[in-house]
Amino acid sequence: MKNLAFKGMFTSIGILMIACSVLVSCNKNHQEAISQNSVDKIVELANQQYLNTLLISGSETSTFIAQNDGLTAVYMANERGFESNATEALNPLTSCLKSVQLSREQALQVRKTLIIYETRNADIIKSHREAYAKIQARMEAARIELLKQSTSAKMNRQELSKKLENLKAQFEQALKEIKEKNAVIFSTNYRELMLNLSKILDERQWGVFSKCLSS
C-alpha cells in the first residue's frame, strides 16, 4: 500500500511539474509573440517617419531645408546620447530608454547595443547626408537663379511663386527617392536594435519603453 501511495504521489508530482513546464513555455511564447508584435509596430512607425519628407523651409526668402537632413531622430540614436544628461543630447529613443529605470547591468548592455547600432548605421547615414547635400545645393542654386530672373523683370511675382512651388515639389521628390533607397537597411538595423532591447528589458520595462516610443 505504501508503495502504491508513493507511486501515486510521485506520479502527481510528475504531472504537476509537466503542467508547470507547459504553462511556463506557453507564457514565454505568449510574451515573445507580444514583443514581436510591438517590435513590428515600432519598426513600421520609424519607417513611416523616415519616409515622410519634412521640409521646414523653402521659399523666396529662405533656402530649402529638411528637418535633420531628412533623417528621423531614432535612426541617429547613439551611446553618447544615452550617456549624456544634457536635454539637447537626447532623442526619443534614448529618452524612452532612460524612462524605464534600468539596472546597472541593463544600462551596460544597452550601451553596448547602441554602439553596435550606431556602427551599423554610420555608412548609410553618411550616404544619406551626402546625397541630401547634393540635392539641397542644386535646389538652392535653382532658387537663386529664379530670384535673379524675378528681379530682372523676366518673370512676375505670380510666375515666381509658381516656379518656387514646383522647385519645392522637385526637392521633396528627390529626397523621397533617397529615402526609398535607404529605407530597407535602416529598418533592418532598427529591427535588430529593437529585438536586442526586448531581450535586455523585462516585461514591464518593455511595455513602458514601447509605449513611450510609439507615443
Image (cartoon, helix red, strand yellow):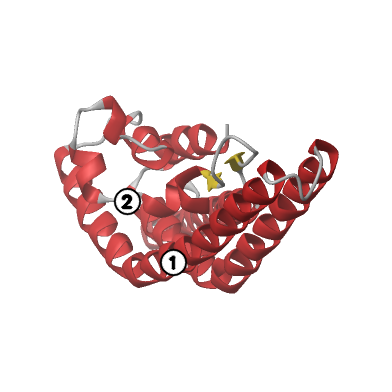
Relative depth, front residue between 63 and 120: 63
Q: In the image, what residue occupies the spot 77% across and 50% down? A: 154
Residue linked to disc 2: 200
**Location of the N terminus (image quadrant):** bottom left
Badges 2 and 1: C-beta atoms under 8 Å apart?
no
- Give percent across and percent down for residue 179: 59, 64
Front-most of 134 and 208?
134
User: What residue did someone put label 1 on?
Assistant: 189
Measured Cα–Cα span from mark 2 to mark 1: 17 Å
Sooner in the amino-acid sequence: mark 2 or mark 1: 1
At a point 62% along the width and 49% down the height, the residue shown is 148
Residue 37 can be seen, yes or no: no
- The answer to whether any part of residue 89 appears in the image is yes
Q: Residue 73's quadrant in the figure?
A: top left
Instruction: Where is residue 186? Give x, y as percent.
Output: 49, 65
The x, y position of residue 190, in whole percent, is 46, 60
Tell me the kind of residue under disc 2: Ile
The disc placed on residue 109 is none
